[in-house]
Image (cartoon, rainbow, N blue to C red):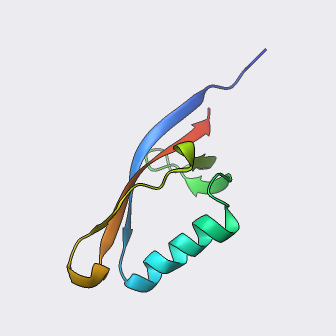
Amino acid sequence: LNTHVMQTIGASVQFRSAQTVADFEAWYFDNLKRIGWFNIEHPRTGQIIRARFQGGKIGKLQPLNTLFRFAKRDLVLEYLR
């Protein structure tokens, strides 16, 4: 019997420098290998959950000023509830 339900939640990740963009991408590609699970604080409840990026996708990098010094990604997290 399956006692857990897959939940999704939308989120935005904001980057405050070009280096934090590079660090995030290195973590995503090299550590997670795109589809891995990771611990994160649930954006609404504050509880630590085990989540992954839905479909392994991290969304399009959107500049918030010139040269991507500030940028963001809109993405969807999925986790078992």
Spot occupied by residue 15 in the image (x, y as percentages of width and height): 38, 73
Image quadrant in which you'd find residue 16: bottom left
Say whether residue 34 is left or right of residue 45. Answer: right
Q: Nearer the viewer, residue 80 or 54?
A: 54
Task: Tell me if residue 38 comes above or below residue 78 in the rendering.
Answer: below
Task: Tell me if residue 6 comes above or below residue 11 in the rendering.
Answer: above
Residue at the image position 23 percent from the left and 71 percent from the top:
64
Spot occupied by residue 76 in the image (x, y as percentages of width and height): 45, 45
Residue at the image position 53 percent from the left and 71 percent from the top:
25
Spot occupied by residue 57 in the image (x, y as percentages of width and height): 50, 51
Q: Residue furthest left?
A: 65
Residue at the image position 34 percent from the left and 65 percent from the top:
72
Q: How many marks?
A: 0
Residue at the image position 79 percent from the left and 14 percent from the top:
1
Q: Residue furthest right?
A: 1
Q: Residue furthest top?
A: 1
Q: Quadrant of the C terminus?
A: top right
Image quadrant in which you'd find residue 7: top right
Spot occupied by residue 33 in the image (x, y as percentages of width and height): 67, 61
Task: Tell me if residue 15 comes above or below residue 66 in the rendering.
Answer: above
